[in-house]
Amino acid sequence: MSTAPITFYFDFSSPYSYIASEWIEALAARHGRTVQWNAMLLGASFQVTEIRTPVSYPLKREYSMRDFERSARFAGVPLTMPEKFPIATTNAARIFWWLHDHESAERAVAWARHGLRALFARGVDLSDNAALLRLCAEFGLDPEQAEAAWSDPQRKARLKAVNDAAIAAGVFGAPYFVIDGEPFWGNDRRAQIERWLEKGPF
Amino acid sequence: MSTAPITFYFDFSSPYSYIASEWIEALAARHGRTVQWNAMLLGASFQVTEIRTPVSYPLKREYSMRDFERSARFAGVPLTMPEKFPIATTNAARIFWWLHDHESAERAVAWARHGLRALFARGVDLSDNAALLRLCAEFGLDPEQAEAAWSDPQRKARLKAVNDAAIAAGVFGAPYFVIDGEPFWGNDRRAQIERWLEKGPF
């Protein structure tokens, strides 16, 4: 069986990404796999694909708001939809890549978990820079350094390059997984991913 | 536990509806439920909601074509995507409601299965009236009566009323299920539906 890493694309503002982020590591580990986390901005993919967030459509909006919380309960993950939704999570994603490049992938993943849980379990508004700086401090980052990082043109270019590469790889939504070259879109592809990891391609 | 019937909305042109149509009856029966099948036209919902078929979006198109067949294999359902896709299945849906109203709900369901399997397992083009008439004959219907039925303004109005009612009920995609008032959208909500039927609301 393959032991190639699982590529995992997520957006800090995506509730289904948050739910998936809570189960992907344990599932991968059970099958001898590691996970490469990639913070991205869905907005960049949406511009290319003309896709919009599900909550922008009549009828689908009401269903989605209900399904986010039900799908979280189904997965056993605490989730309360924040009052402001969706929000811009650009700076949280830039911090992810700053930690990834200057500290370690592990530290970036820890930040991703911290940020996703803050937004979806505690209602912390990641689009509010003051709230984001408090979250950085809570996580053990120097707020001044964090703010300097997300304002740095090089860090902005880094996230843009990630988004461009994600689009080139076919990523149009999140969470999005690539396993042995096979793409899986959505928290609801969990059962198919489990089968792929257990028994191989189908 | 509730034994209220499951409302099941499907579109003859929807591959995920076809896959779901192959498992919903057995699942419902295991839990003492019946299924009320509703043929509808997703196009009518899409006009109201501004949603488009997934295969109309760049990137999402390629993924969806792959996922239709993979999801069918995952469910153990034979599916080969037809060369022409998506297609207009208005007349197949009108025959459904004609059988429903003039013969029985059971006969309409049998037609639904026959039509969905013809399109997705045998490549029969339901948008081609000659092919549809041959399918009617194969199913034991008089082709002249079938053609008269789908051309009848009253039959057209019947399908339009079903679409309007579906939209009023919040249906923006297919397959779409309502169980004890709870909406479930998508073939991939199967696991949540199973849990609901087994253990009740969550």
Image (cartoon, coloured by chain):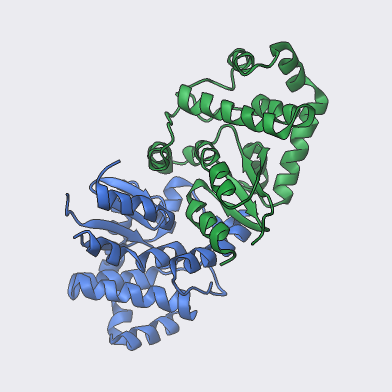
Chain colours: A blue, B green
Q: Is residue A80 visible?
A: yes
Left or right placement of residue A4 versus residue B8 in this view? left
Residue A7 or residue B4, whichever sits in front: B4
Location of residue A3 (image quadrant): bottom left
Q: Position of residue A35 (x, y in %)?
A: 24, 62
Task: Give the residue at the far right of this rendering.
Answer: B154
Tell me which residue sits at (40%, 50%) in the image: A172
Residue A121 versus residue A36 in the image, above or below: below
Location of residue A159 (image quadrant): bottom left
Residue B47 or residue A50, whichever sits in front: B47
Residue A57 or residue B155, whichever sits in front: B155
Q: Position of residue A116 (x, y in %)?
A: 40, 73
Q: Position of residue A33 (x, y in %)?
A: 20, 59
* Total numbered labels: 0
Residue A92 or residue B14, whichever sits in front: B14
Left or right placement of residue B149 versus residue A143 in this view? right
Tell me which residue sits at (70%, 45%) in the image: B166
Residue B102 versus residue A157 in the image, above or below: above
Q: Is residue A150 visible?
A: no
Residue A129 versus residue B71 in the image, above or below: below
Q: Could you tell me which quadrant the C terminus of chain A lies in?
A: top left
Location of residue B105 (image quadrant): top right
Residue A7 versus residue A183 in the image, above or below: below
